[in-house]
Structure formats: structure tokens, C-alpha cells
Image (cartoon, rainbow, N blue to C red):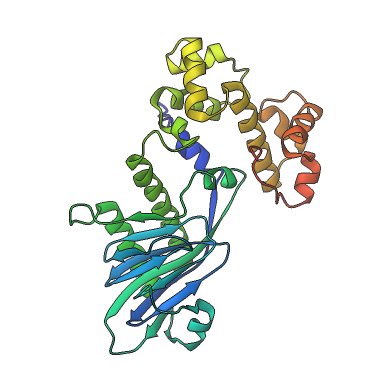
Amino acid sequence: MSVVRPVPDAVSDVLSLVRMRCKTVCANDFAVPFSLSLRGPSARFHIIESGSAFVVLDGKAPVRVEAGDLVILPLGGGHVLSSDPALPAISINHAVKEAERSGSIFRFGKPNGAQTYMICGEFTFAGVLAPKLLSVLPSIIHIKERDGRPLEWLRLTSNFLAEETRGAQPGSNALVARLLEVLFIQSLRHWGSRIPGKLGWLSGLVDVQVGKALSAIHDDPARDWTVESLAGVAGLSRSAFAARFLETVGQPPLQYLTRWRLNLAADQLRAGAARISQIAPKVGYGSEAALTRAFKAQFGTTPAAFRRAGASLGSADH
């Protein structure tokens, strides 16, 4: 029986070390007028099922959102969701206490006002590469209808998410969390496709030739990689590969290799299942002592202390 290997995918490798944690997802039925202030460090999203609204970030022009749109605010920090940007906003916590509630559905505003239906949620990022991912994301990702027609992936995922939120059944919490992950990854694809070459270090992941080398590193981090061997994987000369890698990824190939190995080690320490001496050879270090020296140089602490602290530190790139 032949074994089919997965297609190399450097983006998926990186996202495996960025974990989303869904905090809350609920259906909201708004009636004009409404203006809610949502504050806090968590990321948020809004799917507009019908009607329209404005999303206002501090210091930025209001963004009008309409039926079929998706808005993701990955950096958190707070924003206002309103029917009119000129309205004074009240805190979401106060509004929720005053709102009429039916299961997972909240109703805001005057009953006779024009209706806007949304699915809204709050989530956080975990994983050792989360800070690095957030460093290149914008404060708002607005995905809307293309040429008057909904994007099919957005329509299908949003409808499924809305159905599970408005009609919760056993297992809905787990399913909603998975759908949110799908929605986020799809949104990253869409956002990235619109600004190719301007994605910071993410540009290297989607570069065809550099991406091959990155996938090779991700697939076999313990291998004794050299710039020459990685250039061979990419199908480039050593000098051309080194220059292209530095330009797209923002760091030399072997520096990326070291940091990827340490990020993997940190991720396994967070899982807490393996001993440090077991992790070391898996990520390319000949001994626990060698891993400890490299880990401390990047994270400022030892693997043992990192584990004891609950792995609350950021990425090795920060």
C-alpha cells in the first residue's frame, strides 16, 4: 500500500503553533438605535446576517458593515458597534444586563426600530507564535461581498456558524470553536491574497520557492540543515536563496531554523508530556544541556523554568 504524504504547507505549520481559544459566541438582534462599546484585550469578530451597522475603532474612520460582511478585530483593544457613529456608546456589559435574552440570542434597542442581525464573538490567541502572527496583522480585517455576490466560503461558513449559534444543540460549543478557526484561516487567506508581498514575515510562507525550504525545515527540524541544502530544496543557488529568504522572511535561513526549533521545544514544554531530554533530539539538539543554552539565549529563561511558569512567555522571536 502506498503512503500519500501531505502537500507541504508552511502556513499550516505555523498556524499549528498559533491556537485560537473561543471565549464567547452569541447571536445578537439589534434594533435602531444602538451603540455599544466593546473593550478589552480579546480579539472579536462580527458576522452581519442582515441589516447594517458601523464599526468604529479609536482614532479611525467608521467602517460601514452590511449583510454578508465579516469583520475581525484580531488585536483587540476595543471598538464601538453602532447604528450611527454619532450616538453615545454604552458598555457591552451594561447593555447585556439590560437586554432581552432568549437562550444564546440577545436583543438590543427599541422593538420598532430597523433590525440588524449579527453573530458576534470573542476569542484569544495562544501558542508560542501567536505574538509573531499578531505583529503583522492589521487592527481590522473587513471582508465583504465581491461584485454584489457573497464569497462562497464566507457564506457557507457564516451560515453554518449562525445556525449552530442560534439553535444550539449538544456539541455546539465544540463545533462553533472549530468553525471559528476555519473562518479565521479563510480570512487570513483572503486578506493576504489582496496585499501580496506586504505580509511581513508571512510573505515567506506563501513564496513558492522559499515556502518549499520552510516546509522542509518544519517537516524535519532535527536534520543538520545548511544554507546549501535548503537552497537545493528551493531550487535556487545558495546566494540567490539566501538573499530571497532574507528579503521575504526577514531573517537568515539558519536563524529561522534555530528559532523554529526553539518554538517547537516551547510548544512541547507547554504540552507538558515529554521530558526535556526527550524534546532535545526531536528539535535538533544533541543534549538537554545544548537545548537549555539555546533556549535561554532566546527566551531569557531555562526550559524547566518555562514549564514551571506555565509557558506564559511569548515567542522566541520576541
User: Where does the image place residue 99, in percent across and percent down from the top left?
Assistant: 45, 86
Identify the image quadrant of residue 119. Answer: bottom left
Residue 76 at x, y = what percent?
53, 60
Identify whether 220 is placed above or below 156: above
* Residue under the image location 27 percent in, 72 percent down: 51
Q: Depth check: give the residue in front, 244 or 295.
A: 244
Q: Nearer the viewer, residue 241 or 305?
A: 241
With respect to residue 129, does 95 lie above or below? below
Say which quadrant the N terminus sits in.
top left
Say whether residue 247 is visible. yes
Please name the residue shown 81% across and 29% down the image.
289
Image vertical order of residue 114 relative to residue 168, above or below: below
**Number of numbered discs visible in the structure rendering:** 0
Q: Please, which residue is most extreme toward the left here?
A: 148
Q: Quadrant of residue 277?
A: top right
Q: Is residue 146 above or below residue 87?
A: above
Image location (x, y in percent) of residue 276: 76, 37
Q: Does 312 sit left or right of 170 as displayed? A: right
Which residue is painted at 32% across and 89% down in the image? 111
